[in-house]
Amino acid sequence: MNKRPIIIDTDPGIDDAVALGIALYSEDLDVRLITTVNGNVNLEKVTYNMLRLMKFFNKQTPVAKGAGTPLIVEPVDASDIHGETGMDGYEFEEPDNSLLLDEHAVTAMRREIIESKEPVTLVPIGPLTNIALLLRTYPEVTKNIEEIVLMGGSTSRGNSSVMAEFNIYADPEAAKIVFSSGIPLVMAGLDVGWKALVYPEDSEILRDMNKTGNMIYHLFKKYRGGSFNHGLKMYDSCAIAYLLKPDLFETAHTFVDVELTGELTKGTTVVDLKGKMNKEPNVNVCIDIDPVAFKKWFIESIRKCN
């Protein structure tokens, strides 16, 4: 069976680090390129974090630095969740910078997609700035993109504002471009992330499992995406889980748009589950997850890492 070629666009980020480990060690995914974007912390920090992770995981996937600011809005970050560095809690070795490409992430993505002999899946688990720039700058890539499987959005409430999820809120104009692109889209948002929980007893298992599990355990001690004692939310791993185990999810094929002008709702994903807007469906939205099966898959996936 051929591995599925993917490009991961990311802003590490503690839960990003976990998702990246699972993807890089998966026997079914071929991670062709990793691109970084301003998000959980600034671009320099997330790129530094990504290179440290590549050294830790002992992988040779090329890394390209992308957008340092959103398209229009002022930057926001999530250092209150992930710590000042974005990956507080573990002492990583200094990175090998030879994996960092000289070209911009958008150019690197274009090259990888155009040169690929089979369609590539994009997996953005941060703000969608790079993906929007790619689609607007190089529209020819769309013919060789299989689908976009993203972590972001919500069918109900938000975590950055009352109604908006962080990755969409951080660059809503970029999100609107991506959601209106016509490319097959999967949205793994807060609805499933809130249920994809890792509990203290799970963290104890991870700590003694292997090098990666120990690293994750220490990052989890600093992670504020939920509570270490009451369950940590594995948002970004849900996107990887969808790629590898889609049967974990209940989905709805429906129309989704992004609110740009609402004084109180900017960055909200408007998910038309009841067809009120009479629009053609454009997104497969993950609306539920089997939390027990997810946790089993999650722990088994970390066991395959170094």
Image (cartoon, grey):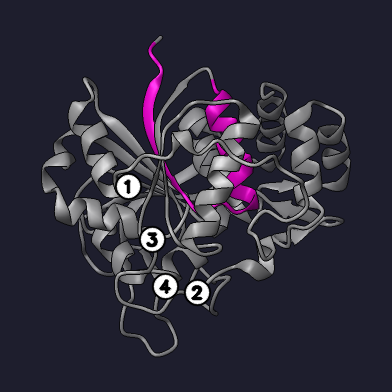
Residue 154 seen from this side: no
* Gap between marks 1 and 2 measured at Cα: 20 Å
Residue position for label 4: 268
* Gap between marks 2 and 4 measured at Cα: 16 Å
Residue position for label 2: 76
In which quarter of the view is residue 162 placed?
bottom right
* Gap between marks 4 and 1 measured at Cα: 26 Å
Mark 3 belongs to which amino acid? Leu
Q: Which of marks 2 and 3 is nearer the N terminus?
A: 2
Q: Which of marks 4 and 1 is nearer the N terminus?
A: 1
**Of marks 2 and 3, the one in the foreground:** 2
Vertical side of 202 occupied by 176: above or below: below
Mark 1 belongs to which amino acid? Ala
Residue 286 seen from this side: yes
Q: Earlier in the sequence, mark 2 or mark 4?
A: 2
Residue position for label 3: 273
* Gap between marks 1 and 3 measured at Cα: 34 Å
**Of marks 1 and 2, the one in the foreground:** 1
What percent of the width, then of the height, locates residue 136? 16, 56
* Gap between marks 3 and 4 measured at Cα: 15 Å
Q: Give the number of the disc on residue 105.
A: 1
* Gap between marks 2 and 3 measured at Cα: 29 Å
Mark 4 belongs to which amino acid? Thr
Q: Which residue is drawn at 18% across and 32% down?
A: 114
Vertical side of 2 occupied by 155: above or below: below
Question: What are the residue bounds of the magenta stretch?
Answer: 2-26
In the rendered image, which quarter contains the C terminus? Answer: top right
